[in-house]
Image (cartoon, rainbow, N blue to C red):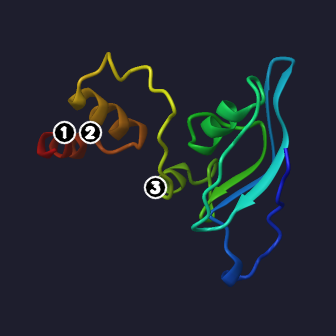
């Protein structure tokens, strides 16, 4: 994977996404081996690679659905391990395939995503009802 290392520290050179030396292991299998790159605000970025390259694992770490073993991921300056709620609020994510599409109603999808983003239950019920 070609990488772009985030090196700037000035306010004018901010990063939308900073991924630095991220590692994730599943037992003896190293799914992510020191992934490092950065994405500037307004830039469209895609992850390409063969099956088993670690794309899904990296996206799970980026979206705070999984914790990386080592390294740092920051979304608009919010560390995904230290500030997961702020990091999630700074990003949008649409999966390529959602296996629950056919199994869940529209209401259930809204409830699921509200729970993933830790919207308070009493607030979520009202928001789902309004939609």
Q: Residue at x 74, y 59 (%)?
A: 38
Mark 3 or 1, nearer chain start: 3
CA separation in Å, label 2 and label 1:
6 Å
Residue 128 rendering spot, x and y as whole percentages: 19, 40
In this rendering, position of residue 113 left or right of residue 7:
left
For image coordinates 16% across by 44% down, the residue present is: 131
Closer-to-camera residue (57/27) = 57
Badge 2 is on which residue? 121
- Left or right position of 81 against 131: right
Task: Tell me if mark 3 has few (under 14), some (14-19) or many (20+) residues whose alpha carbon lies within 10 angstroms of its own.
Answer: few
- Looking at the image, which residue sits at the far left? 130
Q: Quadrant of residue 17?
A: bottom right
In this rendering, the answer to whether 107 lies above or below 71 is: above
Place residue 24 in its image quadrant. top right
Is the Cβ of the residue at disc 3 closer than 8 Å to that at disc 2?
A: no
| CB within 8 Å, label 2 to label 1 | yes
**Label 1 SS:** helix
Q: Which residue matches tag 3?
A: 89
Q: Residue 1 carries which label?
A: none
Q: What element carries label 3?
A: helix
Q: Of the numbered discs in the image, which one, if any, rests on residue 125?
A: 1
Q: Which of marks 3 and 1 is in front?
A: 3
Q: Find residue 97 and report its horizontal and vertical position in percent.
A: 49, 27
Pointer 3 or 2: first along the chain: 3
C-alpha distance separating marks 3 and 2: 17 Å
């Amino acid at each position: 994977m070609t990488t772009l290392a985030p090196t700037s520290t000035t306010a004018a050179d901010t990063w939308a996404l900073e991924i630095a030396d991220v590692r994730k292991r599943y037992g003896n299998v190293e799914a992510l081996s020191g992934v490092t790159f950065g994405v500037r605000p307004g830039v469209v970025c895609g992850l390409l690679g063969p099956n088993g390259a670690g794309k899904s694992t990296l996206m799970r770490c980026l979206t705070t659905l999984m914790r990386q073993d080592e390294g740092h991921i920051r979304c608009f300056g919010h560390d995904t391990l230290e500030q997961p709620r702020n990091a999630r609020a700074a990003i949008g994510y649409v999966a390529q395939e959602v296996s629950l599409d056919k199994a869940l109603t529209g209401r259930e999808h809204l409830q699921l995503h509200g729970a993933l983003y830790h919207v308070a239950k009493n607030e979520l019920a009202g928001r789902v009802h309004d939609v």
